[in-house]
């Protein structure tokens, strides 16, 4: 991936009483920045459906509907293009259900009745992969992303600003991690060490599936366990570099952040909804995520992967090109994850 020319890219912020209208208005403010989609034939929409049941952890189907309606209204030629909503739900995997079931629970299958050029696809239904090099706390590892991802010629991430249990916060860029092979998603966090089986981590004693189960039912207990783990401290540094390696091959062409409800506390699944009633859009993914960080009371340079991506010239999290609502009237100081005091040391050697 080459450096991104962000000099003239806009990032928009809209606040209002209707999620659907907010997103359409925020997209409208981008103007000609969106024109690159005009001749695309195979368009990916990647929601965040990480949770199997918790509505505030997942991208609301109305947000995706707003994106589709706006694009089809502004660019009528896209009626001849194919849109695909593509996801792999992490909670579905650990709870031994399918992403298809999550699509149905959250109303995504209803979209197929409205849009004849739309389809739904699940990560677990694909068997060809492309490898990405990452790190664990014990050395080098690799993860596999669904090879089908590279068939798309325009990629849209529709995500939610949320706190995170390893990476401080998650927005549009990290949302693309949903396209990792289901049983390898946890490798991104650095604590699983297949190539170093003798390395001692919390997963040496408690299987990943059990930790996931506990996290969704007893998050405070899991946080206590992780706070005592030196390996977890190392993992909160590793994950930022792994997100960068993933981002370099999965970079979204458009990020839409639906902040009608965000999430604080025990994100990205078990936190509390925070009603901000905003939408953020940009064709510079880093601008969108940087603005998302500011709205929840963080500076983007204090989130490791955003800082490193900016240093490498992969977008720009400055407010150059900002248009829309007064940030000061919208932002809120979020309650961060209970392990934030550990996570914020990502830059310390």
Image (tube, helix red, strand yellow):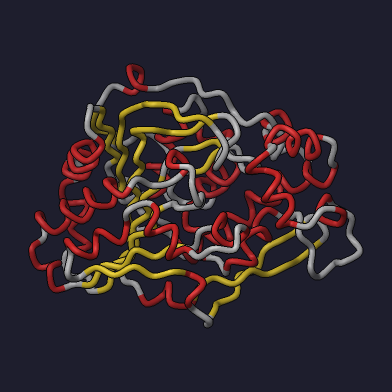
Q: Which of the two residues, 295 or 275, is positioned nearer the viewer here?
A: 275
Looking at the image, is 181 positioned above or below residue 68?
Answer: below
Residue 52: give x, y in percent of width and height: 50, 52
The image position of residue 94, as x and y in percent, is 62, 59
Query: Image quarter for residue 37?
Result: bottom left
Number of numbered tags placed on the structure image: 0
Quarter of the figure that contains the C terminus:
top right
Asked if residue 208 is positioned above or below residue 311 in the image, the reply reads: below
Figure quadrant of residue 25: top left
Residue 118 appears left or right of 344: left
Res. 266 in view: yes
Tell me which residue sits at (66%, 58%) in the image.
186
Residue 28 vertical position relative to residue 329 in the rendered view, above or below = below
Measured from the top left, where is residue 199 in percent x and y? 89, 59
Residue occupying the point 78% across, 33% down: 224
In the orientation shown, which residue stands out farthest toward the right? 198
User: Quick check: 106 left or right of 182?
Assistant: left
Residue 283 place in picture, x, y as percent? 31, 51
- Of 52 and 3, which appears nearest the observer? 52
- Determine the residue positioned at 34% across, 68% down: 120
Residue visible at 54% across and 59% down?
A: 92
Is 279 on the left or on the right of 336, as rendered? left
Q: Is residue 83 above or below residue 313?
A: below
Q: Is residue 174 visible?
A: no
């Amino acid at each position: 991936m080459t450096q991104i020319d962000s000099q003239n890219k806009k990032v928009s912020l809209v606040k209002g009483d209707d999620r659907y209208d907010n997103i359409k208005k925020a997209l409208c403010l981008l103007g000609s920045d969106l024109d690159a989609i005009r001749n695309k034939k195979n368009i990916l929409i990647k929601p965040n459906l990480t949770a199997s049941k918790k509505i505030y952890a997942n991208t609301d189907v109305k947000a995706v509907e707003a994106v589709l309606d706006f694009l089809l209204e502004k660019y009528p030629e896209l009626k001849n293009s194919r849109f695909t909503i593509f996801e792999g739900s992490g909670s579905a995997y650990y709870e031994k259900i399918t992403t298809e079931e999550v699509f149905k629970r959250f109303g995504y299958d209803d979209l197929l009745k409205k849009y004849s050029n739309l389809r739904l696809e699940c990560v677990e239904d694909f068997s060809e992969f492309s490898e990405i090099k990452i790190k664990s706390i014990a050395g080098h590892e690799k993860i596999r992303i669904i090879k089908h991802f590279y068939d798309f010629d325009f990629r849209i991430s529709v995500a939610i600003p949320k706190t995170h249990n390893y990476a401080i916060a998650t927005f549009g860029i990290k949302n693309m991690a949903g396209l990792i092979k289901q049983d390898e998603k946890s490798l991104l966090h650095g604590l699983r060490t297949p190539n170093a089986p003798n390395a001692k981590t919390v997963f040496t004693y408690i299987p990943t599936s059990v930790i996931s189960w506990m996290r969704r039912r007893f998050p405070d207990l899991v946080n206590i366990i992780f706070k005592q783990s030196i390996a977890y401290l190392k993992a909160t540094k590793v994950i930022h570099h792994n997100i960068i390696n993933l981002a370099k091959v999965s970079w979204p062409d458009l990020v839409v952040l639906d902040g009608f409800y965000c999430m604080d506390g025990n994100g990205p699944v078990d936190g509390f909804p925070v009603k901000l009633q905003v939408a953020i859009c940009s064709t510079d993914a880093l601008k969108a995520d940087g603005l998302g960080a500011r709205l929840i009371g963080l500076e983007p340079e204090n989130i490791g992967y955003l800082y490193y991506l900016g240093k490498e010239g992969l977008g720009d999290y400055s407010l150059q090109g900002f248009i829309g609502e007064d940030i000061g009237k919208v932002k809120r100081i979020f309650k961060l994850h209970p392990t934030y005091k550990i996570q914020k040391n990502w830059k310390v050697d």
